[in-house]
Amino acid sequence: MRIEALNENSFYILLTHEDMKELGISFEELDYSNIETRRVIWTLLEEARNALKRDIDPRSKMLIEVFKGETGCKIEFTLSKNDYTGKLKIKKESPTITALFKDFNRLCAFTDIRVLTENETEKTELFKYRDGYALILSPKPEFKGKLRLVLSEYAFVPADSLLSEQLVREYGSLIFRGKLPPQGL
């Protein structure tokens, strides 16, 4: 189990398959309406409280996102700053893919050898982000796995996270929005 802070209101917990087995739950069983899931979430929040040395109240309002990976899953927690009273639920997957490229050469290399057709993505956004570039793609569901695999050869592809996308949108500078031409940049 690995626990890391993203900022003062967000953190994530990486769980291996062994961690999940010890907690007595599987990815497929994660559903906040399930009492067993609530027990696991409260246990994880207690672990995060100790590891991060923060006052994390399991009864406070928060967004919980769960992403399945090859070695287990990633659970991201975002604590609410306001008194939201709506129903919260666990969100399991983001429809977009965010890829973080170290430099323009890697981005160009991806677009040059890309085995994608223009019909595989609905929308593409390119941002200048930190010292590199970020590409946010909205792939058609049937091409998402293939696209993640190809992208991972050229860029860091965080777990399908709405949080990664929102960080890029908030702190990055938009360069391009539309459909990526099949011949690349």
Image (cartoon, rainbow, N blue to C red):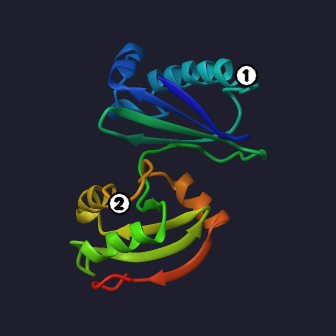
Q: Secondary structure at mark 2?
A: loop
Say which quarter of the image contains residue 74.
top left
- For this view, does 172 lie left or right of residue 95? right
Say which quarter of the image contains residue 105.
bottom left
Say which quarter of the image contains residue 138.
bottom left
- For this view, does 21 lie left or right of residue 85? left
Earlier residue among tags 2 and 1: 1
User: 96 above or below 173?
Assistant: above
In the rendered structure, which amino acid carries the disc numbered 1? Lys
In the rendered structure, which amino acid carries the disc numbered 2? Tyr
- For this view, does 123 lie left or right of residue 163? left
User: 171 above or below 32?
Assistant: below
Which residue is found at the position 55% from the left and 23% from the top?
44
Q: Residues within 10 Å of mark 1 (few under 14, many from 20)?
A: few
The residue most toward the top is: 22
The residue most toward the front is: 105
Q: In this figure, which residue is indicated by the disc labeled 1?
A: 53
Quadrant where the image shows the C terminus: bottom left
Which residue is found at the position 55% from the left and 72% from the top?
127
> Residue 91: percent from the left, percent from the top?
48, 46
Q: Secondary structure at mark 1?
A: loop
- For this view, does 102 lie left or right of residue 29? right
Tell which tag, 2 or 1, sits nearer the viewer: 2
Which residue is found at the position 42% from the left and 53% from the top?
156
Q: Foreground: 32 or 155?
A: 155
Q: Foreground: 156 or 88?
A: 156
Q: How many discs mark residues in the rendered view?
A: 2
Dot label at residue 154: 2
User: 68 above or below 114?
Assistant: above
Q: Residues within 10 Å of mark 2 (few under 14, many from 20)?
A: some
> Residue 182: percent from the left, percent from the top?
28, 84
Which residue is found at the position 60% from the left and 45% from the top?
87
